[in-house]
Amino acid sequence: MPNSRPRVVFNDKGICNACENGNEKIKTDWTKRNNEFLNLVKQIKENSDKNNLEYDCIVPWSGGKDSTSIALKLKLDFNLKPLLVTFSPLLTNEIGEFNRKLILNHGFDSMFINPNQKVARNLAKRFFIERGNPKVAWDAGINAAPIKIAIKFKIPYIFYAEHGESEYGGLTLSEESKKKRDLREVIEHQIGDYPENWANDEISLRDLGPYMYPDEKELKDNNINAYYFAYFYKWSMLDNYNYVKEIIPNFKTDASGRTSGTFTDFDSLDDKIDPIYYYMQYIKFGFGRASRDACRMIQNNQMTREQAVKLAKNYDHEFPKENLNEILEYLDLSSDKFEDIINKHRNKEIWRTSINNKWELINSL
């Protein structure tokens, strides 16, 4: 993982904070963490019985392998009844719709939130131009929606997946924030701004309602407890996929055998715009989707660094051509304008033009 990754920090031995966290996980007493979770489950059930709740907890759910693995474990292993809450992808696709329907048939209730599409498209285009990221507002929506539903239906427990800042290299505000969701981390690291600031002549504050996170007082008044499941059980995206596939053999993956930009076929499959989102990470930070996936597998001893370097060289640079015309239409951009925006976001500290007037990384694997 290069030092161009936002908020990644390397120690004097050249080891990043994600790997330092990985080393901590090796020393973690997982039995103690698992027992802590069992006590939490007991507390959740007592709260449901006391308040006659229809649901024990909420799982922010895309229909993908990570959130689905959590939902299945809560239901099958701990006898909890979660409500699955989905904030609509920007461009839904057949794989995502198929997997969501497949999983709901295993006995779950869900809520699918589809925000005003005129506003969603406006924000996606705006942030693709401004930040090279069409999913900034979507990030806000997936963070806000489960909390709002929790408050509205008086379901005080929420289980998110992993704490990304510690798992993958970032700024961890406190030890407690690895376990429970921190409002400041959500705003600063996952969204980067308060959605209230996005209002303009075309978009009102009321239009931005689906993206606005409840404030600290509202969270405390409603006793909202948002936990990271990965704090209690060691996290692995490959293990999560294998777990889901074992229980639900028909769970769909990329039909081509891998997703563009990487070697995996089972991660982030529910949004047609995701391949462009990951490609823009390569443009802005110099590492692509293959590096991202490989780093996670190296950390869990599922791949060697030598294997990872080869895969990153093969796939990181790959431009995702699938669904490109539909994405251009969604963002209301011509192909030339689209390319101009991509090149505008190239970090000149990591990119240069070659003698053939083509872009190349200054330092590559």
Image (cartoon, rainbow, N blue to C red):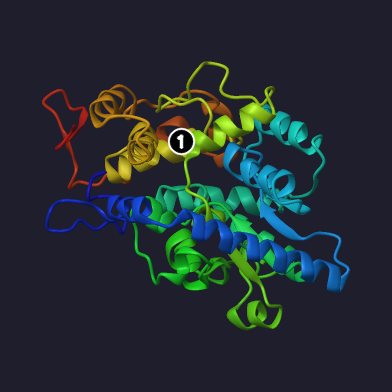
Q: Please name the amino acid that badge 1 sits on.
A: Ile
Look at the picture and state if 139 lies above or below 358.
below
Query: Callout 1: 10 Å neighbours few (<14), some, many (20+)?
Result: many
**The image quarter in which residue 315 lies:** top left
Q: Quadrant of the C terminus?
A: top left
**The image quarter in which residue 278 lies:** top left
Residue 229: x and y in percent read: 56, 55
Helix, strand or loop for disc 1: helix
Circle 1 sits on which residue?
276
Side of 111 where 65 appears, left or right: left
Q: Quadrant of the N terminus?
A: top left
**Residue lying farthest right?**
52
Look at the picture and state if 351 lies above or below 174.
above
Which residue: 64% across, 73% down? 214
Residue 245: x and y in percent read: 62, 27
**Residue lying farthest top?**
256
Which residue: 34% across, 35% down? 301
Look at the picture and state if 258 lies above or below 331.
above
Look at the picture and state if 102 lies above or below 74.
above
Which residue: 74% across, 63% down? 149
